[in-house]
Image (cartoon, rainbow, N blue to C red):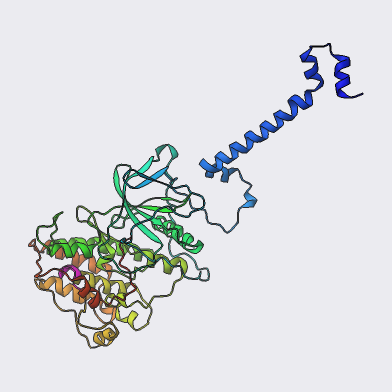
Amino acid sequence: MSSLSEADYRCQQGDTICEIRVYEQEVIVVPVLLLASFLVTIVFILLLRFCPEKVDRIRPKASKSPNRRVLHGIDHPPGINVLEHESIALDVPMSYATFHPPENYISKNLAAAPPPPPQPPSFTPIVQPRELPRQRLPESFNLVNPLPTTFSLPSDSTVSLYRARMDNRNVVLRVLNDTANATERHSFLNFASFLAQLGPHPFLPELLGVVSLRAPLVTVMEELENRDLLSFLWRCREENVTPPCEMTERRIFTMAKQVASALEFLHSKGLLHGNVRARNVLVSRDFTAKLWGLHGVYSRKDQGAARRDDPSMKKWQAPEILAKRPAGPSSDIWSFGILLFEMASLGEAPFAEIPANELLQFHQRGKPLKRPSNCSNALYSFIKSCCQFKDLDRPSMVEMGRKLLSGEKGASDKAIKASEKMSIEQYLLEAGYGETNSYTVF
């Protein structure tokens, strides 16, 4: 007997409840199961969309690659306004980044080298980039604008820089571009992890967090309003500039003492900086100097990158490096002496009259750096002591600290003046820059 005839047989005509009981499976059970499956699917999709970190926690651990390095950071804000009234989403799944900066921006090539054989770390990791609690996340980075460049050179960088406001403070956003490949994305996040593991220091730029859960990847750094020291020194050559800019001998010793403190901090962890120069020092609004240019430190430590034969670095490199011998802490001392010359000369290129390929022979003849005009005997003597040909003749970090403190006490507060503005083209030629080198702040 069919279901229909059974319903007709068992139920009186018009008895709807009786008919529903007969067709219970078809009318109730199957629709409920279908609806439940639909709701579960919708919830999972919403979790993937808005709470990927929770999905990651409930996934089976076996599905994760054992070699994957998980780096947490601050979650992405809903949008970043690069231009006023133009909202740019940070969660487009098919695009790795959504920033489209103008042609004129500061950049850095973060091309990664092949991974080296595993080596024991030279310092103990301290923390990972902090993950801000979700309830404290800003709704957006406010007042986001491309960071203007000091001067522009051709570059194929994968990183763009933006100035923004976050939590009522000025920050700089280092944003990975659409063109970044998997290796560059890995390097970008590992560099943020390296900065966090390095630990805080009053004279190193502060890492405030990372956006690592969604594209585009962003590292958030404190902004130092006076930008890099080299452009600051060039501004000091001009009159009636805004904001005011003035370099005195006392300020030289004060800033040098701050940079030396950061350098000693790196050396205490078994790390060499390798590129101490004015363009790799950042200056805050209150003229505090903070040592930057840490990409090379990270590359040598984590990636085992070979030392680059970069003509634009040779004017700052110690003789032993020019001679292809191993670098040591005293090599950074040599570069520190060149940094003092840059400050005393308000941003002149060192060894301007010597071609880069003749520098080693010049140093071997014992020729010193020329003395900047208006440079005191004490400061010039300190510069020469740092730039001794033999590394053993250079002062140690402890000796440098004592000399800097003594020099600061007896230094003059008279402003250092230069007779002319800096010609960018002339500087590039004298400093040994090639056509493909990029000028970098972050």
Check the image and report above or below for 81 versus 255.
Answer: above
Q: Position of residue 294 (x, y in %)?
A: 36, 64
> In front here: 132 or 199?
132
Compared to 187, does 380 lie above or below? below
Residue 234 in view: yes
Could one spot residue 405 in this view of the protein? no
Q: Is residue 344 magenta?
A: yes
Along the line of sight, which residue is nearer the eye, 422 or 212? 422
| Range of residues picked out in magenta | 342-348
258 or 286, nearer to the observer: 286
- Residue 282 drawn in magenta: no
**Residue at the spot 19% in from the left edge and 56% down from the top edge:** 287
Q: Quadrant of residue 282?
A: bottom left
In which image quadrant can residue 166 be found? Answer: top left
Whole-percent x and y of residue 319?
A: 30, 81
Residue 107: image quadrant is: bottom left
Q: Residue at x 24, y 66 (%)?
A: 278
Which percent across, then down, holds residue 300?
Answer: 42, 69
Quarter that holds the C terminus: bottom left
- Left/right placement of residue 8 relative to residue 98 reads right
Q: Is residue 412 left or right of residue 104?
A: left
Residue at the left extreme of this rendering: 414
Residue closer to the observer: 390 or 226: 226
Instruction: Please tell me how many numbered marks the rendered image carries.
Output: 0
